[in-house]
Image: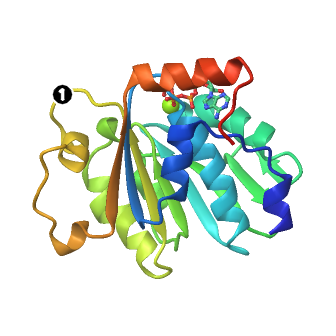
Amino acid sequence: MSATQDLQINLLPWQQQVWTDKSRFKVVAAGRRTGKTRLAASLLLVKALSSKNGKVFYVAPTQGQARDVIWDMLLEMGQGVIANSHVNNLTLKLINGASISLKGSDRPETMRGVSLRYVVLDEFADFKPEVWELILRPALSDLKGEALFIGTPMGRNHFYDLYRPDQTDQTDRQKDRRTHRQTETEADTQTDRQADGQTDR
Ligand SMILES: Nc1ncnc2c1ncn2[C@@H]1O[C@H](COP(=O)(O)OP(=O)(O)OP(=O)(O)O)[C@@H](O)[C@H]1O
Ligand SMILES: [Mg+2]
């Protein structure tokens, strides 16, 4: 799709691996400052561009946090494919009629009653776990939408339950889910190489 080619997307090797994974639900457990949110921004733009008039959500623990970490990043990366942006409701309209909205998991009532093509749950460890089961999972079911869970491994919580390495019970609900783990050291090396102009693509 030509609009997708207008995006300036330059991924680190680990981000590329997540990108090419075809699983419906992806889990990324990676260290601080490894590029998790930037990967999310790239995927949000591409998923929205491939679904005419579709809706995608980026959800952070609070909407303020969502705005702080990804609004400017989306505006910059989406130059050329954004038709208009509404900072008052934190929604971007793309040239194909699709929209990207930024939401907070602390306000589940603002996410009810929509059909979504794609959702990113960033800093998922800080969500109330029921937001996924009760609100976002049902919002994806009509259109068989996809989801990306992002978090930094820290302690034992519902995010740990999602990505944990010793998980062996592949129940039906987990079959279409794939986990990617990235250590800070690996990501640092990749970022440094990229800063030095040595890209892998
Ligand atoms: N593919 C990339 N190319 C160039 N810079 C990148 C890339 N991915 C990430 N970065 C840069 O690395 C920094 C961290 O990125 P990002 O905010 O996405 O990381 P994060 O893992 O979400 O961080 P945090 O742990 O704070 O949530 C940013 O300055 C971002 O622009
Ligand atoms: Mg982040």
Residue pictured at 37% horizontal, 27% vertical: 183
- The quadrant in which residue 20 appears is bottom right
Residue pictured at 45% horizontal, 41% vertical: 122
Q: Secondary structure at mark 1?
A: loop
Horizontal side, residue 17 vs residue 125: left or right = right
Q: Nearer the viewer, residue 108 or 191?
A: 191
Give the residue type at disc 1: Gly
Horizontal side, residue 74 vs residue 152: left or right = right
Q: Is residue 145 visible?
A: yes
Q: Nearer the viewer, residue 165 or 77?
A: 165
- Local packing at callout 1 (Cα closer than 10 Å; few below 14, some 14-19, many 20+) is few
- The quadrant in which residue 70 appears is top right
Q: Quadrant of the N terminus?
A: bottom right
**Where is residue 119 shown, x and y percent of the image?**
50, 58
- 18 w.r.t. 63: above or below: below
**Where is residue 38 shown, x and y percent of the image?**
60, 37
Q: Which residue is mark 1?
A: 155
Q: Quadrant of the C terminus?
A: top right
**Where is residue 144 shown, x and y percent of the image?**
46, 78
Q: Nearer the viewer, residue 187 or 59?
A: 187
**Where is residue 151 shown, x and y percent of the image?**
37, 37
Q: How many marks?
A: 1
Horizontal side, residue 14 vs residue 184: left or right = right
Q: Nearer the viewer, residue 61 or 181?
A: 181
- 184 w.r.t. 14: above or below: above
Q: Is residue 95 visible?
A: no
Horizontal side, residue 57 vs residue 149: left or right = right
